[in-house]
Image: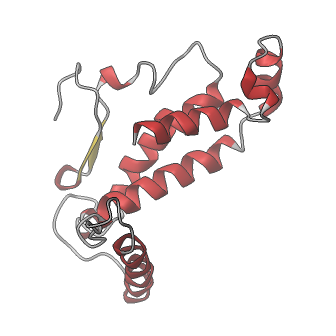
């Protein structure tokens, strides 16, 4: 468990629990004064990230009671492992520096969670009524509107800057 003042989040597979301390519910992760759709790109991606850990290569070996147990069907596990192998290969090809390559196997759990968190948040924002955001921001012209960016694009961009 984490203290309430910690800005972090975690998946606790042995307890079948997720932790989101109160401190994470502040800007830039969450801001009740900005359009809701912008929080999808920030806090929504964090929530999706943590939830997806329950189904990644490390946490999915725990069942609903927190016990080590293979609850996957053979078909689902094979499909997951095939998709995971592609992600490992993709990350193995990344070179953050000319003399350093990533190890996709070592980072697989976080890579799955990052991709799933962003995918879930991005999909969810489609269900939000963008016309509400458009009306709320119409009278606040910024250079971003001239670039054709939407408020939710900005939130996802801010999240990417922090990664």
Residue 65 pos. (x, y %): 22, 58
Q: Number of callouts in the render?
A: 0
Tell me which residue sits at (35%, 78%) in the image: 72
Residue 58 pos. (x, y %): 24, 66
Tell me which residue sits at (83%, 17%) in the image: 138
**Colour pattern:** secondary structure
Residue 126 pos. (x, y %): 71, 44
Q: With respect to residue 70, does 135 lie above or below?
A: above
* Along the viewing direction, whichever of 133 and 22 lies nearer the viewer: 133
Residue 26 pos. (x, y %): 41, 18
Tell me which residue sits at (72%, 42%) in the image: 127
**Residue 7 vs residue 80: left or right?**
left
Residue 33 falls in which quadrant of the image?
top right
Residue 8 falls in which quadrant of the image?
top left
Quarter that holds the C terminus: top left
Q: With respect to residue 92, does 36 lie above or below?
A: above
């Amino acid at each position: 468990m984490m203290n309430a003042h910690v800005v972090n989040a975690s998946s606790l597979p042995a307890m079948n629990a997720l932790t989101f301390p109160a401190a994470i519910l502040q800007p830039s992760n969450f801001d009740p004064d900005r359009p809701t759709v912008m929080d999808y790109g920030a806090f929504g991606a964090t929530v999706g990230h943590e939830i997806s850990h329950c189904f990644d290569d490390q946490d999915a070996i725990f069942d609903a009671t927190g016990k080590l147990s293979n609850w996957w069907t053979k078909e689902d596990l094979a499909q997951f492992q095939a998709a995971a192998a592609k992600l490992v290969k993709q990350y193995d090809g990344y070179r953050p520096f000319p003399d350093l390559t990533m190890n996709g196997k070592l980072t697989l759990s976080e890579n799955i969670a990052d991709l799933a968190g962003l995918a879930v948040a991005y999909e969810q924002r489609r269900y939000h009524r963008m016309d509400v955001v458009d009306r709320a921001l119409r009278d606040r012209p910024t250079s971003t509107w001239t670039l054709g960016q939407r408020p939710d694009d900005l939130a996802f961009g801010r999240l990417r800057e922090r990664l």
